Image: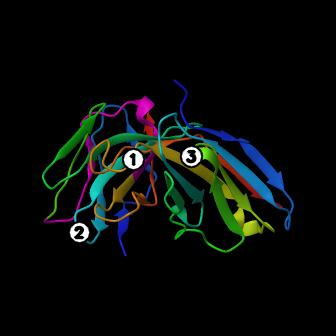
Amino acid sequence: GDSVTQMEGPVTLSEEACLTINCTYTATGYPSLFWYVQYPGEGLQLLLKATKADDKGSNKGFEATYRKETTSFHLEKGSVQVSDSAVYFCALSSYGGATNKLIFGTGTLLAVQP
Amino acid sequence: GAGVSQSPSNKVTEKGKDVELRCDPISGHTALYWYRQSLGQGLEFLIYFQGNSAPDKSGLPSDRFSAERTGGSVSTLTIQRTQQEDSAVYLCASSFPRGAGGPNSEQFFGPGTRLTVL
């Protein structure tokens, strides 16, 4: 079945460091890909998405490019801030099925230190 | 401009008791999802409602779990004879119908109900 694999955390960075969180997927068909973020004490929020190959999703300085050839959707940010500290989830949703359910990776905790 | 709301925010129960968790989706969202977030299993899909269609129950882990959605709005997730392994955060999400916001309409999540089974 469809699945998402993302790098395990925690990832600890200093402010202004570069961030990459790896995400790869296995899916039949042509999934849409998402990054969700969960800030401490808050609910899941959509950070960015891409619906087809070579699309780049971006938001709040974060970017991820849908790479069909490597089945990847790595999350990147050039300069992280303390406020980016959160758990990040990579997810996919298969197009063509009856249910729009999301399949999530295990989540990566990011801790940014001042 | 309310988002998805869930109640209660926390629930502590004894093993063997039944619990009901409630979700109020965003007005106008006809699609509603339940997910479970637990330490051992991560985030898992449980059940999906879309309008008046039969729900997709493929993610429910056992027949102790059931859910209903009355009037196409509020949903209740019921867990009967709770077990310790049911302890988790139960998340509800809603979205516009599939296709209305593009091939995969964004799902908006509620804050969750933290269930602890003693």
Q: Which residues are magenta?
A: A69-89
Query: Residue A47: which quarter of the image?
Result: top left
* Amino acid at circle 3: Gly
Q: Is residue B108 above or below residue B47?
A: above
Residue B4 horizontal side relative to residue B86, left or right: left
What is the spatial separation of the Cα atoms under label 1 and label 2, in whole angstroms? 20 Å
Looking at the image, residue B28 lies above or below residue A108: above
Q: Quadrant of residue A2?
A: bottom left
Q: Are marks 2 and 3 on the same chain?
A: no
Residue drawn 59% across the image and 40% down it = B111
Spatial separation of the CA atoms under disc 2 and disc 3? 30 Å
Circle 1 residue: B97
Q: Nearer the viewer, residue B93 or A70?
A: B93
Chain name for mark 1: B
Residue identifier under label 3:
B72
- Tag of residue A98: none
B23 and A78: which one is in front? Answer: B23
Q: Residues within 10 Å of mark 1 (few under 14, many from 20)?
A: many
Q: Is residue B77 left or right of residue A18?
A: right
Q: In the rendering, at what x and y percent does residue A88 appear?
A: 42, 47
The amino acid type of the residue labelled 1 equals: Pro
Label 2, residues with CA under 10 Å away: few <14, some 14-19, many ≥20 = few
Which label was assigned to residue A29? 2
Instruction: Tell me the residue at 54%/68% (across/down).
Output: B59
Name the residue type under label 2.
Answer: Gly
Q: How many numbered discs? A: 3
Residue under the image location 18 percent in, 53 percent down:
A52
Q: Earlier in the sequence, mark 3 or mark 1?
A: 3
* Mark 2 and mark 3 residues within 8 Å of each other at the beta carbon: no
